[in-house]
Structure formats: C-alpha cells, structure tokens
Image (tube, rainbow, N blue to C red):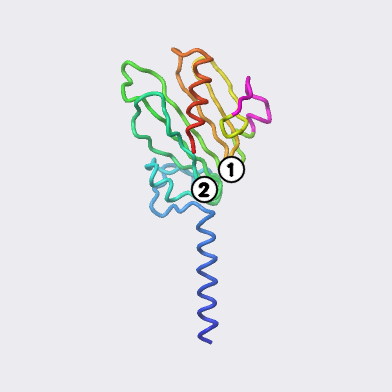
Amino acid sequence: MRRAGVLAAGLLLTVLTSCQGSMLVDGELKLDRHSKGHYPRSYKPVSIEKTEDVIPFKAHLPEFIPYKYEKPKIVITDWGKKKKLQLETEYGRKDQKTEKGFIALKIFNHKNLVSELIKNKKYEDTLELEDGTEAYFAYFGNYAELFWLADEEEYDLRHMFANEYSEKQLKKELLRIANSMN
C-alpha cells in the first residue's frame, strides 16, 4: 500500500512538472486588462529576468541595439490557456529629446502575425540571418520591419519612427539586431 502511495505521488509530481514546463506560470504576474473568461489577457509589464522565469519557452532577445536605451520591460499576453503567448517590448532611446524612434519586438510561441505576413507576402525582400534562417523585410517610410520563424516561435522586429534612416540603413540595422538574438 505504501509503495502504491509513493508511486502515485511520483506520478503526480511528474505530471505537474511537465505541465508547468509547457504553460505560463502566472502566479506572480498581475493582469492588466482582460474581459473575464475571454482572451487575450495581458499582464502588467515585467523585467526580462521575470519573463524568463515564467514563460515555457526560450525567448531570444537582442544583445545589440544601435543606441543607448532604457532598460526594457516585457508585456506578456496570453492568447489561450496560458499556452499561446505573445511577448512585446520596446527599446526606447535614453535621449529621446534629440533622438527619435525606437526598436519594437514581438515574439509569439504560436502561429499569429508573422505567419500571416509571410502567407500574404507582406514584405519586399527575403534575407538570410547568419544562422541560415529566412527573414522577411518590409519598409513603410517611417518604420521598417524584419520578421521570421525560428524554434517554433515567430519574431517581429521593427524600427519605429526612423525617418532619419534610409531603407538600406534600416535593413542593415535590423539584420544586425536580429543576428544578435541568441
């Protein structure tokens, strides 16, 4: 009897551990906005370190940003049962009085925005990241976007309000940022 109890406890622990590894651990997160019983549910911004502790996948974030920036916070949005997640952050310039624009990043661990952009060919150029991943570039005058699929995740990297840059400069900067994301 005792052996059966130990076996049952071990099995329960294994199930709980495996579920936790595939779901958002939101115990310490505070909901920002949501309608009860409906998705998406956004949480108040948290640090990169806190994000890494609570999400069930490895989010690749930039190690290079082309200017001095404010320490970013990440907004986590739950699109379904703590499994379909979106991370969103901005790298705002420290000196926003003389320098305009910022880098914005969205990461999805499920099919979402990026898959649709690729499917509908909402890009002007196909590029290759250093690791061989195919990336797609789109230019809209006051901002540019680079997006790609990697490790079951979708990445959408934008250089916003970048009027002082040419299309070629924006493409080069976005590629450099994307290649710094390990």
Residue range in magenta is 116-128
**For residue 43, side relative to residue 83 (left or right):** left
Depth check: give the residue in front, 168 or 116: 168
- Under mark 2, the amino acid is Phe
Residue 7 higher or lower than 161, as above or below: below
The residue sitting at 50% across, 79% down in the picture is 6
Please provide percent x and percent y for residue 31: 42, 46
Percent across and percent down for residue 115 are 63, 34
Is 181 drawn above or below residue 78 in the view shown? above
- The picture places residue 51, in percent across and down from the top left corner, at 42, 45
Q: Is residue 128 left or right of residue 53?
A: right
Q: Circle 1 — which element?
A: loop
Q: List the single residue furthest toward the bottom.
A: 1
Q: How many marks?
A: 2
Which residue bears the numbered disc 2?
A: 57
Residue 151 is labelled as 1
Q: Is residue 136 magenta-colored?
A: no
Bin the neighbour count of mark 1 within 10 Å (Cα to Cα): few under 14, some 14-19, many 20 and up.
few
Q: Which quarter of the picture shows residue 48?
A: top left
Check if mark 1's residue and mark 2's residue have beta carbons within 8 Å: yes
Mark 1 or mark 2: name the one nearer the start of the chain: 2
Looking at the rendered structure, the secondary structure element under dot 2 is: loop
Q: Amino acid at mark 1?
A: Asp
Q: Residue at x 38, y 27 (%)?
A: 92
Which image quadrant is residue 155 in? Answer: top right
Image mark for residue 13: none
Which residue sits at x=37%, y=35%? 72
